[in-house]
Image: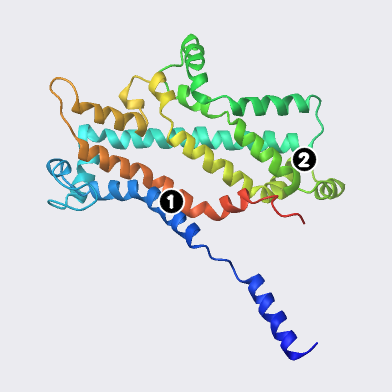
Amino acid sequence: MTAPALDRTSHQAKGLMAPRKSPLLTIVMALMVIYALLPLAWLLISSTKSQDSLFGSFGLWFSGPFSFFSNIKDTLTYDDSIFLRWFGNTLLYVVAGAGGATLLATLAGYGLAKYTLPGKRAVFATVLGAIAVPGTALAVPTFLLFSKMGLTNTIWAIIIPSLISPFGLYLVWVYAVDAVPTELLEAARVDGAGELRTFFTISIKLLTPGIVTVALFSVVAVWNNYFLPLIMLNDPKLFPLTIGLTQWNQQATGVGSNPIFNLVITGSLLTIIPIVVIFLLLQRFWQSGLSAGSVKQ
């Protein structure tokens, strides 16, 4: 092959390896990023304003005295520090509910993926059907059931329904099929390892991306849960952050209203910080979990 032919081949190879750039796609992605970050920018800017300057200034720019730290202090101390109580309740519901849902989904999904059980197809169909049913459709029947059991207006009315995660079970199920080689389990059994030892020493390490993915979805679902606590709880001391902030927001209506929009906005900002931190810390596991099975080995 001559030198010019080699140069052409080299240029063609570089052209195939070089990423293609699309100005239209870049513009669309930039607009999507702005659309996603604009509410966060408004929330952050508004949390620096006092109650008086919230409605007398442009929402996307700073105005008036810088009240960010005073707003945080007032939010944490208002009404005998009820915000901290709501924050603690939310953490309890997340740790018990989302943690339990992740554990149950992991155990059930792994068992269904790696063991031969009678009626597995029926279970699979039931799980898919449960995923298709929205949670709001089950809220009223759940309330009636818990009312008969005397569990309404208790922490168990939030924790127990949160333990059920059909989507998490399905995700672990399909992930475990390829993530945990059957040959590896058989080798462990031949070496004398029991099922529990095999699961906790081998399988759980291979399932880590899937488990973290399920945990993230469960944490976000419980953290943002609104409708279930709304119908289950009437004691403000048991409210999660979603219901508590709504209660603060409703103080601006009715006779003798006491608007505290600056505290509502600051409380909303403080509410999303833990979720953002969790996603930033665990995003590498989350991304690997979503891409699992996309490449054939």
Residue located 31% across and 44% down the image: 269
**Where 40 sits versus 110, above or below?**
below
Q: CA distance from mark 1 to mark 2?
A: 47 Å
Residue 235 x %, y %: 33, 21
Residue located 79% across and 24% down the image: 119
Q: In this orientation, does residue 246 appear? A: yes
Most foreground residue, 138 or 156: 138
**Dot 2: element:** helix
In this picture, residue 82 sits left or right of residue 133: left
Instruction: Point out the residue furthest to the right here.
Output: 190
| Quadrant position of residue 177 | top right
Q: Which quarter of the image is occupied by the N terminus?
A: bottom right
Marking on residue 32: 1
| Quadrant position of residue 120 | top right
Label 1: how many residues lie within 10 Å, few (<14), some (14-19) or many (20+)?
few
Amino acid type, mark 1: Met
Residue 52 x %, y %: 12, 41
**Where 18 sits versus 26, above or below?**
below
Q: Which residue is identified by label 2?
A: 195
Residue 90 x %, y %: 40, 35
Amino acid type, mark 2: Glu
Q: In this orientation, does residue 77 appear? A: no
Residue 5 x %, y %: 74, 85
In this rendering, the count of numbered labels is 2
